[in-house]
Image: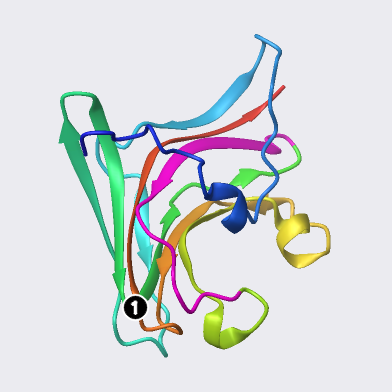
Amino acid sequence: MKTRMSDVLKIASAFLLVFVATVHSQEQNILLQEQFDNISNWEPLLFPKIKEHSSYTVVADDEGSYLKAQSNASASALIYKKKFNVSEFPYVRWRWKVENLYEKGNAKNKKGGDYPIRIVEDYRAAFGESPPQVASIAIMNDSDNTKESSTSCVDYIEVFSK
């Protein structure tokens, strides 16, 4: 990726499902600081009714490493293996890049409810109710409904408190 992260967040707001806090304080308690040197802290999350699964690989280049997520009429996720108290660590930030958008994508209906990448941590924003005390974080690239293809990259993810 020549311009690896130069277009990061250009289109991310269209797919944002989580609350991202901009933290100006230097004092932070970081629970997770994932740089994607490997994915040993993550495990696949497969959906029984979906036959084709998205792929997740670590790619290293001269700028570092990142997670590459690819889908082709598929869906699956990676879920962080460790659970944490979301009240104690309510903030998440990341940097990602989406290489393409879906032509048939439409979050308002199931047929178009696919996303080139999504990171889900803010339960209240996603589901409209308070989250359980203990939860985890997941990364997902899905195109099972639109039957399209997508490649996206995640440079890092941090989960923290102020």
The residue most toward the top is 26
* Residue drawn at 21 percent across, 39 percent down: 1
Mark 1 residue type: Ser
Which residue ends up furthest to the right in the rendered image? Answer: 129
Identify the residue at horizontal 19%, vertical 42% (top origin).
Answer: 59
Residue 103 among magenta residues = yes
* Depth check, front residue: 81 or 143: 143
Q: Is residue 39 within the magenta segment?
A: no
Whether residue 88 is visible: yes
Q: Is residue 36 left or right of residue 130?
A: left
| Residue at x-position 67% and y-position 39% | 20
Q: Position of residue 140 (x, y in %)?
A: 44, 61
Question: Where is mark 1, residue-wise?
Answer: 74
Residue 131: tell me if it is visible. no
Task: Give the farthest residue toward the front.
Answer: 103
Residue 71 placement: quadrant: bottom left
Magenta residues, start to end: 88-106
Place residue 111 in its image quadrant: bottom right
